[in-house]
Amino acid sequence: MRAHRSWRYLLIVLVLAASFLAFGLWRLSRDDERLTRWLTDSVQSATGLQMGVQGTGRFGFWPRLSIALDGVQLRSVGDAGSPAQIGTMRVQVPWSSVFGRELRVSAITMNDVVLDAVAINTWLARRRDIGPMPALRWPQLDASLSIHRLRYRAPDAQGVEVDTFVLDDLQLDRWQIDQPAVLDASFVLTTLGPRAFQLQAQCTPRQSGTSIAIEPCAATLRRGGNEALALRGYLRHDDVARVESQLRIEAPQLPRWINLAPIRTQPKPVDLALRLVGSIAGPLKAKLGGNLSGMGVDTDVVLPYGWIAQIRAGEWNALAERTTGFARVDHLRAADVATASNRKDAIETGLIEMDDIEWRNDTAAESSPSSVVPTHPAHSVQRR
């Protein structure tokens, strides 16, 4: 008799479990549309871009419940290009969200993301033509975010689109106003070579009216090995494209992956204070002071509009003519280089040391040259 009751209870439990699972699967069949619609509405309300997806979502049940979307594209109405393309986006959904009215997301993973600089600039120009840009606001992200392989494509000097920035991996635990966030990233700046940088940061996003900020922020930047730069400070940006940043840069000595050739640094600490005020596009006031591995540095300059494009093009002399301010170094050690008449390569013959070097340009007129003046004459130090 007891055996019959046990089997009966077990059968009831199995029936309830089967009903529970069937109801969950029925809700899941609806959640792919609900999730896609929720993501589309969120993206469009935040950016004005329309999100398109190839096909329908695919469900995954291990190790967590998730929905995968393929071929995600963000487009602006009337534009042929796509500012952002995502190969695969996987969204993890708690089981409790299946049976609730409000959709919740616990984690977002993106693979093979491509950002197109030309399409982004076209979209921004179109938004400016429509009317004033909306005030900047930090997006709120309660879920963790993982990005694997992000490429930023932009035309080079010949007009050929190349990957100027490659993000190999990014892990962000959350992004909420006035709450600390932890970020780990590995990225490559193609102009500096194929080796990847590793960035670890802990920062707090803040919002005040039309001003957004990352304050405070502490980060460590590496490029292979154990040599690292430590950065501490803040970054603010307001609605009139004005930025303000103050950073403290420290290291036991200048990492070897920072090449200042032909300048020769010493195995001494790096302790610099950097302050930026203005517009990223220019004019931008930059002030840098402190010790750079044995060199006392004091710089206060105003970079002109278009300074980024001139650096990319290698137009250093033209940039110096348009930049106002001064730069001082108390002691400089540089390689003394000579070129043999029958060789193309430069031959380093020794060291040149100079004291109290100053560059100054008070006019920024195209016709008036800036100058680099050593207070004391240079003297050569032959190699042993």
Image: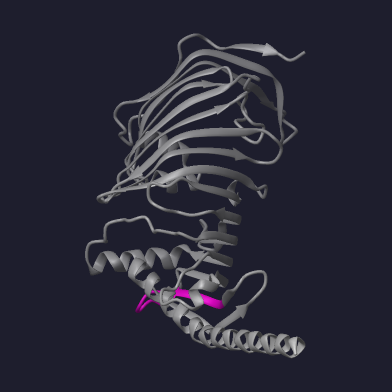
| Extreme-front residue of the structure | 1
Q: How far across and down, in percent of the image, does residue 252 sit?
A: 62, 24
* In this rendering, position of residue 340 left or right of residue 78: right
Q: Does the magenta stretch mainly form a helix, a strand or a loop? A: strand
Q: Which residues are magenta?
A: 69-79
- The image shows residue 52, relative to residue 148, as above or below, that is below
Tell which of 361 and 211 is nearer to you.
Answer: 211
Q: Is residue 129 magenta?
A: no
Q: Quadrant of the C terminus?
A: top right
Which residue shows up at 25% across the image and 50% down it? 209
Residue 70 painted magenta? yes
Write the residue at 58% across / 33% down. Answer: 229
> Is residue 170 something one can see in this rendering?
yes
Q: How many marks?
A: 0
Q: On the rendered image, what quadrant is the N terminus found in? A: bottom right
Question: Which is more toward the observer, 220 or 383?
Answer: 220
